[in-house]
Amino acid sequence: MIKHILFDLDDTLYPTSAGLMHAISARMSEYMVTRLGIPAEDVDRQRRDYWSRYGTTLRGLYVERHIDPQDFLDFVHDVRVERYLPPDARLEAMLARLPQPKSIFTNASAKYAHAVLRALGIEKHFGAIFDIVFVEYHSKPAPSAYDKVVAALPVRADECLMIDDAARNLVPAKRLGMKTMWLKGSADALLAEGSECADFTIKTIYEVAEVSMRGEL
């Protein structure tokens, strides 16, 4: 029986088409060029490499270039979230139908996560935010990040459901015994890596309540 639900944040609680992550990604590239002096033509290659080996651009820069992670987070999240995300009454109603306590598990910062939740009008539904600072900058899918989150929950791992748009982020959750749900919201093949570990596959976040109402959670 599922007693707690962990939601990813970006491109999960809102669609990729909103454009917010595109804006943040542009800020990441800008940071690498203007703050670190990396040639613009080499940024994409380095970011793909970091994403593959470390899980996020931040983790790669933290390990290999010893950046101040908070400076990076402040820079890349310096966007007007509300310009991209209007209140989502349908999402708010869907979350209200789920009886389980809910938390956010994100590779972003808690400050930014709160801004996203407020913009969507759903902040009241989440009791905790496990952000990149909480997991000591060990980005998903690093197993140590999941261990730290599970240790902070009032339930066992096998009583949790984790929802993420990047299937590879479900792999460590599955190994811990969690139920897993992949939001297949993009055609990006990289996001499908690890999809065999998904117990459920949905196309929009609104389908979570439908799965619950069928008694599958």
Image: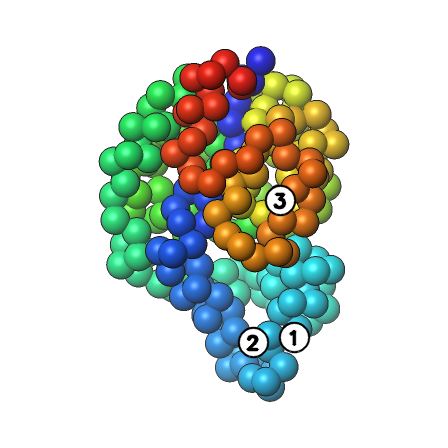
x, y percent for residue 68: 59, 65
Dot 3 or dot 2, earlier in sequence: 2
x, y percent for residue 99: 41, 17
Q: Residue at x 62, y 49 (%)?
A: 192
Bin the neighbour count of mark 1 within 10 Å (Cα to Cα): few under 14, some 14-19, many 20 and up: few
* Element type where label 3 sits in the image: helix
Q: Nearer the viewer, mark 1 or mark 3?
A: 3
Res 154 quadrant in image: top right
Bin the neighbour count of mark 2 within 10 Å (Cα to Cα): few under 14, some 14-19, many 20 and up: many
x, y percent for residue 6: 53, 32
Marks 3,2: beta carbons within 8 A: no
- How many numbered marks appear? 3
Q: Nearer the viewer, mark 2 or mark 1?
A: 1
**Circle 1 sits on which residue?**
45
Q: CA distance from mark 3 to mark 2?
A: 27 Å
* Element type where label 2 sits in the image: helix
Q: Which amino acid, mark 3?
A: Ala
